[in-house]
Image (cartoon, rainbow, N blue to C red):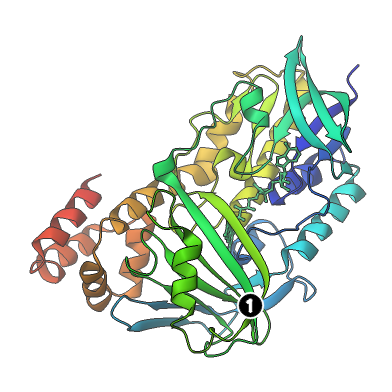
């Protein structure tokens, strides 16, 4: 007899959704090393309406604190493109309240949660897993039939259980962010994204509004850039009249796995979900919704494994297949889009923005350019920019 059927490591969006999915049908324990769920957030807290629909979530004013109707993109030459809908397209969350709600729901479903419990060892013994968990410097052993590793980008649990989750530095971004208040000069119903290789190499700066005069102001750049993400963000904020005199009420930093998807997200008695499985959108770095979906799917497969008493790597491989069908294959296409974007110079970027429309831009990002798009792009719009044309042809050919 094991102590639990399922142990979920990590009480972030992935782990909590796995717990909601499994709590009713199995004996489930969630462990997290932090002292408070959702805090610190390491996130700009934007979540699009698509994920509310997919996850059957109703926005509540307690945690869906800012309605977002679109985005404004700022090009290196100082122009901007505004895309504003009449209705909400998404929300900026207060993650610490949102995740506590998920935790309460998971416990109502039957799961148990323990905070300040860090998994420091994991070993497969016969057909079960033994975790070594540290709580207030004391160590204890807890056993289960299957582990769902939802322990974020610096996941060790999956590695300890034999899965290769090594991050490819080329597919990793560094994020740095201030939650600022007392700031002005931007439309609070839009996300604001600033591009340019000088201000944010291989990435962008964002303002994600959270109530009037308060916003998450952050940056994501390639992990191997010469200067740090903080350096670029501080430099840029000093140039912004509406921001430079604001106050910083929270500092967040984190690594974002923007590609390098895992071939296998399962090993014997193990499933991995969320950032731990690199389930993040490679273009904008968003991962809350994908983590929730991944956690829910991992939960479904964990329950199946328990019902069938089948825990081998091969038995669990349906999980990875289903995830790729559900989201992974789309994300792989978007990774190609990011690889294209990072080759663009500021000039190329300005030219593209001036010459293509929003729908074309979205189809480039999603990897869903039609034959007609390609003809117009190649023969009319990019014909005078041979280098850009070559890049785009290579991208479209793949
Ligand atoms: C700067 C920045 C901005 C971002 N902005 C956005 C955004 O606006 N929108 C969006 O959708 N995504 C955003 N993301 C990405 C998003 O934050 C993640 O994709 C999301 O949090 C992943 O959820 P998760 O549950 O997989 O992991 P996490 O939220 O990281 O949760 C992992 C949990 O595991 C726990 N843990 C780790 N190791 C152990 C251990 N050994 N034992 C016990 N517990 C452990 C951690 O304490 C943590 O609570 C951003 C990321 C960064 C860094």
Q: Quadrant of residue 127?
A: top right
Picture residue at 20% right of the left edge, 56% below the top: 392
Q: Position of residue 390 (x, y in %)?
A: 14, 55
Q: With 355 as the anchor, is 167 left or right in this view?
A: right
Q: With 278 as the anchor, is 66 left or right in this view?
A: right
Residue 178, compared with residue 281, is above or below; it is below
The foreground one among 124 and 255 is 255
Q: Quadrant of residue 378?
A: bottom left
Q: Position of residue 268 (x, y in %)?
A: 66, 19
Picture residue at 77% right of the left edge, 36% below the top: 8
Picture residue at 55% right of the left edge, 50% below the top: 255
Image label count: 1
Which residue lies under the disc numbered 1? Answer: 180
Q: Position of residue 114 (x, y in %)?
A: 88, 42
* Visible residue check, residue 48: no
Q: With 115 as the anchor, is 217 left or right in this view?
A: left
């Amino acid at each position: 007899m094991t102590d639990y059927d399922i142990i979920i490591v990590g009480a972030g969006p992935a782990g909590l959704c796995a717990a909601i999915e499994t709590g009713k049908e199995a004996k489930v324990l969630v462990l997290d090393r932090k002292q408070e769920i959702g805090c610190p957030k390491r996130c700009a807290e934007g979540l699009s309406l698509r994920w509310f629909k997919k996850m059957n979530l109703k926005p509540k004013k307690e945690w869906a604190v800012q309605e977002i109707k679109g985005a404004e993109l700022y090009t290196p030459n100082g122009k901007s493109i505004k895309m504003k809908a009449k209705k909400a397209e998404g929300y900026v969350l207060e993650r610490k309240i949102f995740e506590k709600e998920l935790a309460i729901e998971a416990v109502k479903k039957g799961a148990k949660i323990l905070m300040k419990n860090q998994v420091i060892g994991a070993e497969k013994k016969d057909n079960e897993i033994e975790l070594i968990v540290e709580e207030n410097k004391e160590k204890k052993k807890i056993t289960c039939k299957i582990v769902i590793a939802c322990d974020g980008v610096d996941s060790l649990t999956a590695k300890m259980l034999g899965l290769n989750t090594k991050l490819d530095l080329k597919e990793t971004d560094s994020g740095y962010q201030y939650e600022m208040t007392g700031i002005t000069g931007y439309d609070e119903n839009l996300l604001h994204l600033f591009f340019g290789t000088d201000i944010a190499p291989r990435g962008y700066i964002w303002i994600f509004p959270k109530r009037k005069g308060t916003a998450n102001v952050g940056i994501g750049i390639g992990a191997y850039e010469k200067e740090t993400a903080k350096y670029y963000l501080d430099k840029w904020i000093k140039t912004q009249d509406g921001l430079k005199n604001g106050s910083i009420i929270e500092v967040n930093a984190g690594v974002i796995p923007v590609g390098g998807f895992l071939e296998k997200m399962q090993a014997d008695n193990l499933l991995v979900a969320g950032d731990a499985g690199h389930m993040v959108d490679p273009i904008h770095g968003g991962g809350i919704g994908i983590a929730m979906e991944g956690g829910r799917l991992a939960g479904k497969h964990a329950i199946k494994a328990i019902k069938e008493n089948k825990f081998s790597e091969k038995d669990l491989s349906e999980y990875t297949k289903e995830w790729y069908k559900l989201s992974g294959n789309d994300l792989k296409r978007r990774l190609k889009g990011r690889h294209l974007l990072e080759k663009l110079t500021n000039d190329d970027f300005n030219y593209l923005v001036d010459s293509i429309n929003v729908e074309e831009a979205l189809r480039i990002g999603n990897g869903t350019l039609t034959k007609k798009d390609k003809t117009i792009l190649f023969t009319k719009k990019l014909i005078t920019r041979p280098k850009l044309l070559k890049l785009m042809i290579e991208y479209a050919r793949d």
